[in-house]
Image (cartoon, rainbow, N blue to C red):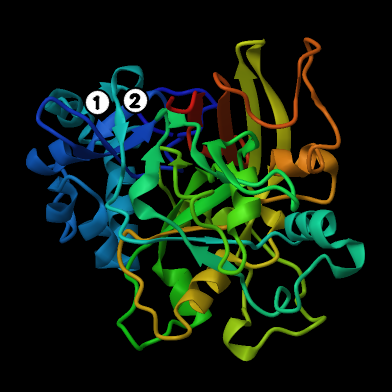
């Protein structure tokens, strides 16, 4: 336990200690969180309460330099913070007197890192099968490469935004059917995608691929990711090079990066990947998947309260995050501290576990019901999407905070 009080239901027990950056009167500051208290780590360093070799990096305005230090430094900082904030800590009075403890409700989280590059994958077999079935039929749902490698595309780093940022409905080229010319207009089929994102820490040099184990050791931590999607724009533009404008207008992340170390107790075995067998460079010797429950709720002008329409789990991924990162580097691509990778939509085998409205309405053929009688196929102006995730431990849980975005009307 910590000397900072919290309830068993909190996302942020002392076993978590996520990393983030918050706004303060003195400017952006690296922080962590325990219960409903944000801990200004920069103040702890400047007060002489944190003194490790990593300490100087925690006085910067982003986490990139700290990410670059590597796993040993991340672990030591976590250990030192745990000792500093634990119940019975000899430093309790000094921490309280330092001014580092802030009420979370009065603190604005910022982007935790400079995202140099953003890549999104397509790593849920159930999601890929659902989408493939819709567009190509059940017998041809998965493309020939899908079970051999983690499929991905390069996204847009500049439009990755923190939770709470409004999302403007995008405009783009649309084509209603094959027998009419394209038009320019507002997206009509706006969707969310339930994903997890993960930040690269140490990375690799240009020309030097990472092994799966090196990739696993290089993952700094995880966030919830809502990769907003304009389905009608995507349908027209994606041939032959894949997603472009339909994905580059916004990707929302939760405010706190939960470390890979905090999630280690929740590691689970993934699928066998033996039919067909993966190539040697993608083989794993230990579990690299995680059991993390994830939900997505929607409310809007005609739906007063958030209603959960997706309940899924990160363990449904076919490819692990370590495999995704290793494959990303296989050609010698150099990954850098602060690079963000997304898992792709996480769907399970049951309908309630489908991670996008495209699936839940089955390409517009079904209505998604809400308790008050309202329905949706895709998102309306004024809708707010709230995603949440946690891993359940024995008497505590590790959470991420909410990932929230509200849909604004398209520009005139």
Nearest the eye: 327 or 259:
327
Provide residue 396's location: percent of width, then percent of height: 57, 36
Which label was assigned to residue 123? Answer: none
Nearest the eye: 106 or 154:
154
**Mark 2, residue position:** 37
Residue 18 seen in the figure: no
Name the residue located 14 percent from the left edge and 24 percent from the top edge: 97
Name the residue located 71 percent from the left edge and 73 percent from the top edge: 146
Helix, strand or loop status at disc 1: strand
Provide residue 335's location: percent of width, then percent of height: 36, 72
Helix, strand or loop status at disc 2: strand
Asked if marks 1 and 2 touch (Cβ < 8 Å), the reply is yes
For mark 2, does the 10 Å Cα neighbourhood hold few (<14), some (14 to 19), or many (20 or more) residues? many
Picture quadrant of residue 209:
bottom left
Provide residue 234's location: percent of width, then percent of height: 60, 51
**Mark 1, residue position:** 101
Q: Is residue 312 left or right of residue 222?
A: right
């Amino acid at each position: 336990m910590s000397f900072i009080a919290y309830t068993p239901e909190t996302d942020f027990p002392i076993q978590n200690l996520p990393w983030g950056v918050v706004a303060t009167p003195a400017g952006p500051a690296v922080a962590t969180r325990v219960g409903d208290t944000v801990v200004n780590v920069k103040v702890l360093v400047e007060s002489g309460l944190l003194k490790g070799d990593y300490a100087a990096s925690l006085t910067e305005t982003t986490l990139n330099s700290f990410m670059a230090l590597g796993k040993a430094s991340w672990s030591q900082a976590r250990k030192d913070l745990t000792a500093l904030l634990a119940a019975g800590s000899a430093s309790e009075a000094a921490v309280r007197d330092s001014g580092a403890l802030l009420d979370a409700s009065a603190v604005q989280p910022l982007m935790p890192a400079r995202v140099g590059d953003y890549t999104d994958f397509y790593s849920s077999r159930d999601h890929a099968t659902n989408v493939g079935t819709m567009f190509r039929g059940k017998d041809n749902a998965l493309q020939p490469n899908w079970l051999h490698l983690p499929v991905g595309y390069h996204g847009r780093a500049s439009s990755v935004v923190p939770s709470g940022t409004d999302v403007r409905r995008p405009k783009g080229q649309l084509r209603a059917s094959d027998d009419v010319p394209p038009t320019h207009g507002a997206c009509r089929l706006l969707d969310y995608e339930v994903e997890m994102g993960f930040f690269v820490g140490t990375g690799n040099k240009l020309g030097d691929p990472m092994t799966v184990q090196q990739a696993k050791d290089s993952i700094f931590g995880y966030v919830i990711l809502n990769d907003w999607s304009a389905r009608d724009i995507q349908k027209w533009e994606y041939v032959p090079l894949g997603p472009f404008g339909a994905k580059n207008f916004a990707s929302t992340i939760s405010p706190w990066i939960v470390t890979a170390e905090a999630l280690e107790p929740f590691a689970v075995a993934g699928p066998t990947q033996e039919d067909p067998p993966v190539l040697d460079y993608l083989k794993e010797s230990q579990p690299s998947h995680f059991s993390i429950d994830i939900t997505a709720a929607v409310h809007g002008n005609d739906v007063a309260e958030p209603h959960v329409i997706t309940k899924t789990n990160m363990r449904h991924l076919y490819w692990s995050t370590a495999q995704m990162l290793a494959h990303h580097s296989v050609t010698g691509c150099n990954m850098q501290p602060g690079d963000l990778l997304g898992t792709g939509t996480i769907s399970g085998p049951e309908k309630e576990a489908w991670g996008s409205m495209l699936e839940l309405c089955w390409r517009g053929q079904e209505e998604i019901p809400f308790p008050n009688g309202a329905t949706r196929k895709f998102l309306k102006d004024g809708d707010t999407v709230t995603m949440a995730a946690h891993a359940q431990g024995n008497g505590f849980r590790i959470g991420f905070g909410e990932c929230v975005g509200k849909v604004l009307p398209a520009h005139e």
